[in-house]
Amino acid sequence: MKNSLTKKIVAAPYLLWAAIFIIVPLIFVVYYSLVDANGSFSLDSIRSIGKYSDIMLNSIWLGFVATIISLLIAYPLAYIMARTTKNMQRTMMMLVMLPMWMNLLIRTYSLMILLQDTGIINSLLGAIHLPGANHLQFHMINTRGAVILGMVYNYIPYMILPLYSIMAKIDYGLIEAAQDLGASKLQVLRKIILPLSLPGIASGFTMVFVPSVSTFYISKKLGGSTFSLIGDIIEMQFKSANNYNLGAALSLILMVLILICMAIMNRFTGDDDDGGVLI
Amino acid sequence: MEENTIIELRHISKKFGDETILDDICLNIKDKEFITFLGPSGCGKTTMLRIIAGFLEADDGQVLFEGKDINALPPHKRQVNTIFQRYQLFPHLNVYENIAFGLRNKRMKERDIAKKVEEMLALVNLRGFQRRDIASLSGGQQQRVAIARALAVEPRVLLLDEPLAALDLKLRKDMQVELKNIQKRLGITFVFVTHDQQEALSMSDTVVVMNEGKIQQIGTPLDIYNEPQNAFVADFIGESNILDGVMLDDFKAKFSGAVFQCLDKGFAVNESVDIVVRPEDVDVVPVEKGEITGVITSNTFKGIHFEMIVDIQNFKWMIQTTDYYPVGSRIGIEIEPDAIHVMKKSKYSGMYGDYSSFSDELEHLSDLEEEEA
């Protein structure tokens, strides 16, 4: 049929794109993780992952904490955005997007300058000479907190946007109907807004959790030289250790773990809702 | 305050920006009555309903519930419930949970909730629909669930915001009867908002006709139809010929170049007035017997009757008859005294009740628009 032929032609570039940049690399990842340096089949790489399990779990945990913090900050903000005037919505959206115009590396670097022991925050605190605390200083850089802050700061727009778009779609009449039936503000939030925004939570969760878990730059700059996440290990295998097989195996396992996390998350939020973008 | 008043509006005013939506509204709603706010879109009827429900606050004035000021009471603490125009059923909950929503807020026991839901579904003829998904219901069924959900919490007053507007004609007629029955059976107050005059007349105990933020007339459907207070009401409720006239004396009105006997009195001598004659109240007689005469300019068969536009002294009347008269012929007109209704002049005088711009084509178009709406 002509129609389906047209469809195929229109879809072809995308399929080609997906094949070259998604499917083929994935096949390479699987291939490299299942062979040794000589190219013969071997499970050594997969087996050797055991010694990175702590780092792997630590990465997932930090990513999870960063995602939850992002959610807690983004949720009220997205709700306020969705309920304000159109003009205000545009302005707030602009402000949310603004940091994303800058490169992630630059953003992380500036965060580093802020947090250093001799950085801007500590210099300022030193300069104002608070009474009772002569040398008031916070050690912030190279801590888990700094890494989490970096993740939240860099990825929170990806939480705000899906939440905002799903909340803007919630019919205000439903909220009125709930109030009409005796629901207090808290009950409206719990029984109407929260369940209806679950698809937004699910996609926001995915979009923050996945890059947070696999990040390497943020942890390197804000976590210090001794602090490494799984992303750093993978990067190291490819860049300096030249062990593609271990790097690929780690990537594969990380991918599987993330998929498992997302599956749990989807089960938790109900998977039959539309409007959510799930990777 | 009257003994059985349940809701009283005192000098309610509301503006949106510079636009006055409600202008000094005073109204008593009696307990257990079916009262309808009727008016064209933008007349303020929905705003009034939302002020009673608590979704909007009036700029001025008071809302009293059984004599107590409830201005500051939020919607979830008021003993009124609303049926929304677009139903606003909760899409993430099934029929059972939708109806149970208000009961759960009251912390009712699960067993009592189940019983109440079943009772409500029986009331709206949806037995066995508990587990159904909202999205799987037809418009009419959603409407019924909305009614069941609102009535489940046993409100003292049910507010209905054009609840039938989205239904097709046949379903709308059925629901009109059903709503009226439910109201009688439960004995609670219904406050109904509509722009459909036929709906208002056939369902209500009391009709409140509104226009431009003001109450034009309050009365029983019969009063409103037979004794409209001004040209707006006469025109909005049914078809009317509204003519310029002069009251020569009590019971004597002059219009269309003739003097007619009527039943109205109490006007000043020679006071100019608006005269209302309903199209179905005009008797067609042979030319020589007519009090006045006119020429038929159009004639449309409507099923039960013919609808003619008749030119009488350059004023186009609408007249309904069961006999056929050809276009272009001259007929005589006779009007019984009780078919003439005399109204004081108002700001609406001269704006309505002339059928000179009326044509079947236009009527056809407006019918289509109504159906689409």
Image (tube, coloured by chain):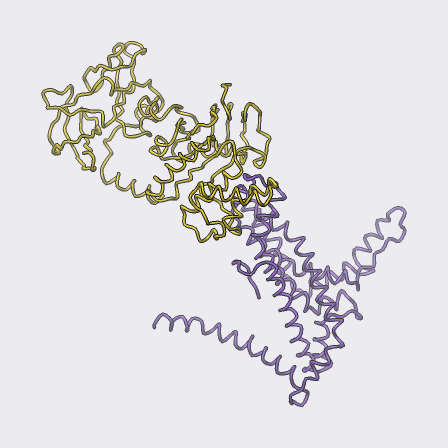
* Image quadrant occupied by the C terminus of chain B: top left
Q: Give the letter of the yellow chain.
A: B
Q: Residue at x 22, y 15 (%)?
A: B254
Viewer-side residue, A31 vs A227? A31
Q: Residue at x 57, y 57 (%)?
A: A199
Q: Position of residue B252 (x, y in %)?
A: 24, 12
Judge left or right: residue A67 versus residue B223: right
Q: Which image quarter: residue A53?
A: bottom right
Q: Position of residue B195 (x, y in %)?
A: 38, 35
Q: Position of residue B119 (x, y in %)?
A: 49, 41
Judge left or right: residue B145 versus residue B288: right
Q: Is residue A215 above or below residue B360?
A: below
Q: Which image quarter: residue B63?
A: top right
Viewer-side residue, A4 vs B257? A4
Q: Position of residue A184 (x, y in %)?
A: 61, 40
Viewer-side residue, A147 vs B236? B236
Q: Give the letter of the purple chain.
A: A
Q: Residue at x 60, y 43 (%)?
A: B109
Q: Is residue B102 above or below residue B336?
A: below
Q: Is residue B221 above or below residue A75?
A: above
Total numbered badges shown on the rendered structure: 0
Judge left or right: residue A9 versus residue B97: left
Q: Is residue B9 above or below residue B183?
A: above
